[in-house]
Amino acid sequence: MEPIKIAAIQIDICHCNKHKNIEKALRFSEEAVSKGADIIILPEVFSTGFCYEDLEKASESSPYPTIEELAAFSKKNKCIMIGSIIEKHSSENRETYTNLGFCLEDGELVGTYTKTHPFGKEKRYFTSGDTIEPIHLKGRDLTIGLQICYEIRFPEIARKLCLSGADILITIAEFPNPREQQWRTLATARAIENQIFHIACNRSGSDPNSTFFGGTMIIDSLGNIMSGAKDEECVIIAEIDTSLMRKTRKSIPIFDDRRPELY
């Protein structure tokens, strides 16, 4: 597999302002592709933040207008784009909402993942997903394991994605202060214990309830931070070669040495 250039975009999400957030995401994505990015990663619910007070306006149903805007960019620039939005499901009796992760490849929606572990207040507003599977790209020999924010605390999720064939692990998040040290430790641990490249993309700035430290990182399969951000809006980029993952797993064969019958 050829080396892949990955860009993680760290932005201050404007609360409930979809137009401004999409414009900002596309502006930073332009910077990413100008630097040769093949994969562009955006934070959790990047287009609205957790806009609980106006979920009807913040949420979208298929064909997802926000995803369509990104799809046009993805098609034009022949790149992969990953993030999440608030999704709405309508029935005769009520409307429900989910945190929908998505993956676009060259303009096509090739996979989605619904957050399976909402955190705290999210549980009052969002329905949990019930499937954890990696996303297989169609035009590239690459499989992506996507998890969302709080799920970085559940090693079982990353392990299942890796056992199911993920070549890279991606966590998109709104991980707030004062938990920066926890974020850094968890993100590095998920990379080391699964011997996989891990892109941990967090937001910066603030919303009505929290402030955010940023701390977006691209981590290799040995746990080394290849590129990292502080608390500013920025694009970080690193070129990854998944052959390092295979070499790491051959050198220290934790997947071969597992004894799942005991745990």
Image: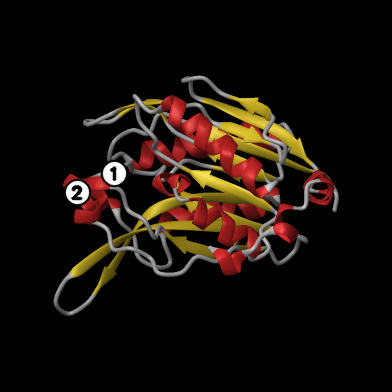
The answer to whether mark 2 and mark 1 are in CB contact below 8 A is no
Q: Is residue 23 left or right of residue 107?
A: left
The residue lying furthest to the front in this view is: 262
Rendered residue at 46%/33% (across/down): 183
Q: Which residue is mark 2?
A: 54
Q: Is residue 244 left or right of residue 98?
A: right
Rendered residue at 39%/38% (across/down): 174
The residue lying furthest to the left in this view is: 93
Q: Check the image and report above or below for 18 versus 181.
A: below
Q: Which residue is mark 1?
A: 50
Q: Is residue 86 left or right of residue 76?
A: left
* Numbered marks: total: 2
The residue lying furthest to the bottom in this view is: 92
Element at label 2: helix
**How far apart are the two marked residues, 2 and 1, measured between alpha carbons?**
9 Å
Rendered residue at 71%/33% (across/down): 238
The residue carrying pointer 2 sits among few (fewer than 14), some (14 to 19) or many (20 or more) residues within 10 Å by Cα, namely few
Q: Check the image and report above or below for 185 versus 4.
A: above
Location of residue 23 (image quadrant): top left
On the image, the x and y values in percent for residue 29 come to 59, 37
Q: Which-is-in-front pick, marks 2 and 1?
A: 1
Query: Which three-letter amino acid code belongs to the residue tagged 2?
Result: Asp
Element at label 1: loop
On the image, the x and y values in percent for residue 30 come to 61, 35
Q: Nearer the viewer, residue 41 or 71?
A: 41
Location of residue 19 (image quadrant): top left
Q: Check the image and report above or below for 145 versus 186.
A: below
Rendered residue at 68%/63% (across/down): 165
* Residue 106 appears in the picture as rendered: no
Q: Nearer the viewer, residue 12 or 255?
A: 255
Query: Which three-letter amino acid code belongs to the residue tagged 1?
Result: Phe
- Find residue 185 and name its label: none
